[in-house]
Image (cartoon, rainbow, N blue to C red):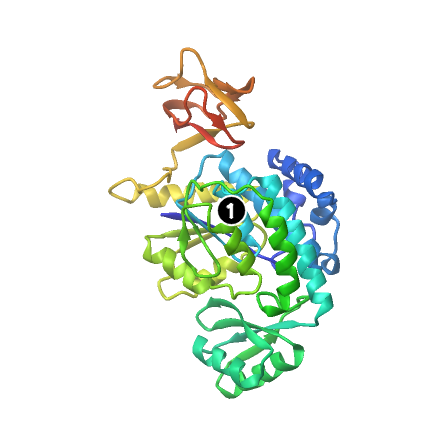
Amino acid sequence: MIVFTYPGQGSQAPGMGAAWVNEPSWELVEEAGRTTGRDIASLLLEADANQLRQTRNAQLATFVMSMLVLDAVARVGLMPNAHAGHSLGEYSALVASGILDFGEAAYLVAERGEAMQLASEEQEGTMAAVLGLADAEVEAACEEAGPKVWIANYNAPGQVVIAGSPADVATAGDVARRSGAKRVMRLQVGGAFHTPFMASAYDRLTKAIAQADFQDPDAPVYANVDAAPYESARPWPRLLARQLTSPVRWQQTIRRLLDAGGETIVELGPGSALTGLAKRIDRAPATLSVRSPSDIDPLLESVGARSATESARPEGESLYAYERLVVAPAAGVFTPARPDCKGSRIATGAVLGEVNGEPVRSPFNGVVMDYLAVDGERVTINQPIAWLRTD
């Protein structure tokens, strides 16, 4: 079972888009810019650390970076069995699973970032990571410290983030140290995220979410607020709104994924924070991160090597290293080639059909094992069209 995970705010870095400028996936930057009215290319290429630290910039830049990586991975045909995103990364997971359209999600992320920044300016807040202390002891430290400090992230064993007013966060940190915490580290963020301090952001984002169109996913998405998998679109407007003022239960999410059979967890986007957190779980799965185009071939080799050692094909849409998916180049109605290519050996560039008049060309040599879309089906961009066994 392969799981794709998506990072949240804090993973961004100056120049993180440079490696992607000449890749086909870069077209998503322009699309997101049109949807949001923001110069996203500048954020990914030119913004300095201080600019990227602003919530309104950090969230949009990180989301688009994860989408660039996802698009590139989808183009080579690797599909996961489940998705999960940390905080902001949940929006990436919803796009990846088909629950939200990319453009619509970009708009929501822009609204979320703006709303959270304004909420932070209205009420001063901060966050701190408590290291080396059990969850229950950190919870007790917050209760003892005062009424305005809460758990914001359950990240991993021995790593919990607290948030709230600067005074109460400092007091909770002192209590945690007395209880045996190895370190309490103040985070460079603009507010107390995932706490009641985000109430005004909740109101604004809820209105934006109400206008969005949610579709059922093609693979389950595990939610931050309760670590549960959801295979229906219906709960997601409520879950996204609740996420703003509720703790991110990431440690619980990874454990639930492992319980469900997760074996390989792949982080798509800037940084490798989630990869590091997954390694801290006592049943640590295989972990991989994809941040640049050069990471894609090693990912395929690693997944292929794992598949080759298994006695049976994994459940779901996992692929062996010698298998690839051909995906739709655009959204629209699919029409297969006539006669169709099923069972045929084809060369790179062969036309398998068309979507709204645009040819679906294979980027690989190999045998067409089957079509995954039927004549007349309305498909989305990058939806799998055919399954190849490559040469």
Q: Amino acid at mark 1?
A: Leu
Q: Is residue 189 left or right of residue 229?
A: right
Identify the residue shown where x is 57% and y is 78%: 184
Residue, disc 1: 94
Looking at the picture, does residue 378 appear above or below residue 340? below
When asked about the image quadrant of residue 255, the answer is: bottom left
| Above or below 123: residue 183 | below
Coordinates of residue 192 in the picture (x, y in percent): 63, 69
Residue 218 screen position, x and y as percent: 42, 40
Q: Residue at x 45, y 20 (%)?
A: 376
Q: For this rendering, which residue is in front, 226 or 23?
A: 226
Query: What percent of the width, then of the height, locates residue 194?
Result: 57, 65
Q: Quadrant of the C terminus?
A: top left
- 148 sits to left or right of 54: left
**Secondary structure at numbered mark 1:** helix
Confirm whether residue 122 shows in the render: yes
Q: Is residue 63 left or right of residue 321?
A: right
In this view of the protein, which residue sits in the foreground, 136 or 207?
207
Residue 21 location, x and y as percent?
Answer: 67, 39
Viewer can see residue 61: no
